[in-house]
Image (cartoon, helix red, strand yellow):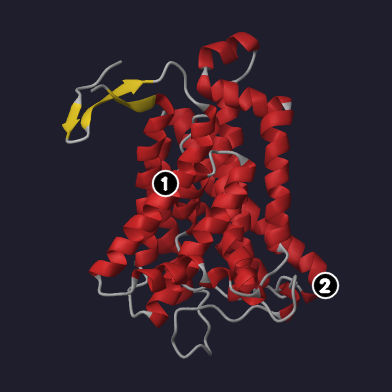
Amino acid sequence: MLLEPMRSQLGVWRIERRPAATAWMRWASPLLALLLTAVIAAMLFAMLGKNPWQGLAVFFVEPLRNAYALSELALKATPLMLCALGLAIGFRANVWNIGAEGQFLLGAICAGWVALLDLASLGSVGLISLLLLAGMLGGMAWAGIVAWLRDRCNANEILVSLMLVYVAQLLLAWLVYGPMKDPAGFNFPQTPRFSAASVLPKLIEGTRLHIGFVVALLAALAAWLFMFRARAGHALQVAGLAPQAARYAGYSARRALWTSLLISGAAAGLAGAFEAAGPLRQLTPYVSAGYGFAAIIVAFVGRLHPLGIVLASLLLSMFFIGGELAQSRLGLPNALSGVFQGVLLFSLLACDALILYRLRRVV
């Protein structure tokens, strides 16, 4: 396939299709996209009247400066990793769940509800286990709505899952402004603080990093085993990518739909439970910093592979921390973090074209 040649002072260049997709470019593409993002970020800092090197240092150096900064990096990466792992399983099955943000919020709501019950008799281990289970079930129930509507009504799962995010946001707002509002909270929209028995154990004293990070790493290992070593994972991917071949092999596309969405919902709900019972210790309208949406970028930057997702979640968590530091130190809006996430995604999409196409100098 040849496209219209591009003429420049350096000669005539043509975009042509590669004979075969290059495997090395598949993994080099995210690195090239990151480099392009850094270049565009430096340009944005210069346009805003800031020192580009100082701005880049806030995003790429400060989050790695010391042990406490690294613990915050891992803390931010935990919900991103969990949500992205669940999404990757669905995307590989050709099930496009865009509503991990809503499933995250339902997980936080259900975990918060359990944490506020008088269940001290269960002990800390029992109470934490119960609220984490409640978070997973909440996320699964929210994703189950998407699966049921797709299965029974052939509704588009992209639109349904996305619209349910706003329902979840409104439900959370109603709860913290109403039934679950702290009567001693000076009229702020928040629940009472969770009891000490329901707070997640710390991995490192003096930091906010909790056991959720270890669980997320174990979840990445479990996802790898499921995707590439389990028959069920293979069946799920085949059913999504080649439904006719899957039917011939006896695999069920319907089962792939339900399995991928329920796994994705459980992972996002668990992430929400970790966030509520970890660094926040209560529910507010701002439980999520947009982790569910950012996890979509994490999944694609990580190539829908568990190892890549672990690395991509650490990268995106640098963007979250960098946005907070840019606001406090450089006087820039925190929305800059979202801008860089978008730039990274579009850079990745552009660089992915080089997997199938190449620039060739004709003259």
Residue 207 showing in the rendered view: yes
Of residues 266 and 237, which is closer to you in this image? 237
Q: Quadrant of the N terminus?
A: top left
Tell me the kind of residue under disc 1.
Ala
Residue holding disc 2: 123
Query: How far apart in space, not on screen, are marks 2 and 1 (Cα)?
Result: 48 Å
Taking the image as shown, residue 319 lies to the left or right of residue 12, namely right
Residue holding disc 1: 33
Mark 2 vs mark 1: in front: 1
Residue at (41% x, 43% y) in the render: 348
Q: Position of residue 202 (x, y in %)?
A: 73, 73
Mark 2 secondary-structure assignment: helix
Q: Position of residue 342 (x, y in %)?
A: 36, 53
Q: Is residue 236 above or below residue 45?
A: above
Indicate the quadrant where residue 215 lies. bottom right
Of residues 203 and 107, which is closer to you in this image? 203
Taking the image as shown, residue 270 lies to the left or right of residue 54, namely right
Indicate the quadrant where residue 149 lies. top left
Residue density around tag 1, few if under 14, some if 14–19, many if 20 or more, within 10 Å: many
